[in-house]
Image (cartoon, rainbow, N blue to C red):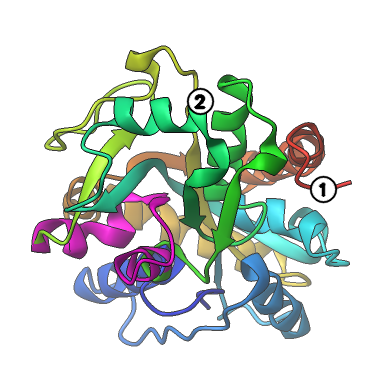
Amino acid sequence: MAPSTPGGGWDVLARTIADTLKSTGREKEVEVYNVGGKAGTLGLADFVKLKGQPNKLMVTGFVMVAGIPVNNSPYLLSRDTTPIAGLVSANEVLLVPVNSRFKTVDDLLSTLKATPGAVKFGGSSLGGTSHVAFATLAQELNIPVKSMQYVPSAGGLQAAKAMLTGAVDVVSTGYSEVDELIRGGSVRVLAVLAESRLPGVNAPTLMEKGVNVNVANWRGVVAPAGISALEKTRLELQMQRLVKSTVWQITLKQNKWDDRYMGANEFKRFIQYQENQLPKLLKSLDLIQ
């Protein structure tokens, strides 16, 4: 399951996993289906009903862990699913239409400092990486978070398409979600929200401009709760083999993903840490009460 609409980051990862498993001969048949909405929590609500089924996987990540408190979901990934593997992380990029009035990121920062409400930001769901990125940017610039306009979409690709209609001015999203739009020339990257520049992307980081915004969207896979220890091990080994394959390594470079592999037990501890820390971050950014 990709708990998002087609074309989003989770969908891209789910289909990449399926294609890699089939091309390397690990599985003959892998079906990907989508259940989008509310930062993946609608998909999670469906997935927990599959308890005990070892032939199911769901892509998850930062957005879902943050979306659970934002959407008042009663579930927790660490408790209501079986974490299998952390796989990738992807830093956000700031995206504008090719003919945007913001020619450089300095133009954007100047406008924000002068009139923060004059810029409409877009991205994925409320509380997700895009929302956190803009809220963190506001904090860094000493701008009240509530003074900034944020328009959520079902995913980064959908937000970028909304931007091209004029609905928003700037979008924050993972590079892989909008790679085709960038290559097509309708949008351009204004800045990278990372410690270092992305290879092959002609855009500075915000940190180069003295603005400490470094937002990465990690992603991995979980199985339903209630599977056996043997079934959990089988799925974990499947992911271990997948990330070692040449096909996967090529895909990482193509999508500008960072290798973030974690085995099942380490991934569960990481999720538990995120479940503890993210609500604190969201509260500090005034994104939840």
Q: Is residue 233 visible?
A: yes
Chief secondary structure of the magenta span?
A: helix
Residue at horizontal 27%, vertical 74%?
Answer: 19
Residue 143 numbered tag: none
x, y percentage for residue 26? 31, 72
Instruction: Check disc 1: other Cα within 10 Å, few if <14, some if 14-19, many if 20+.
Output: some
Using the rendered view, name the quadrant where residue 278 is placed.
top right
Residue 113, numbered circle: 2
| Residue 42 at x, y percent in the picture | 70, 78
Q: Is residue 175 magenta?
A: yes
Q: Amino acid at mark 1?
A: Ile
For the point 45% across and 42% down, the residue is 261
Residue 188 or residue 63, whichever sits in front: 188
Residue that mark 1 sits on: 288
Give the residue at x 40% y 79%.
Answer: 6
Q: Mark 1 falls on what kind of element?
A: loop
Question: Hey, which residue is sitting farthest top in the picture?
Answer: 210
Q: Secondary structure at mark 2?
A: helix
Using a 10 Å C-alpha cutoff, classify the residue at mark 2 as few (fewer than 14 neighbours), some (14 to 19) or many (20 or more): few
The magenta segment is 159-184
For the residue pair 46 and 215, the one nearer the viewer reads as: 215
Q: Is there CB contact under 8 Å for labels 2 and 1?
A: no
Disc 2 residue type (three-letter): Lys
For the point 38% across and 24% down, which residue is it? 206
Q: Nearer the viewer, residue 60 or 268?
A: 60
Q: Position of residue 105 (x, y in %)?
A: 30, 30
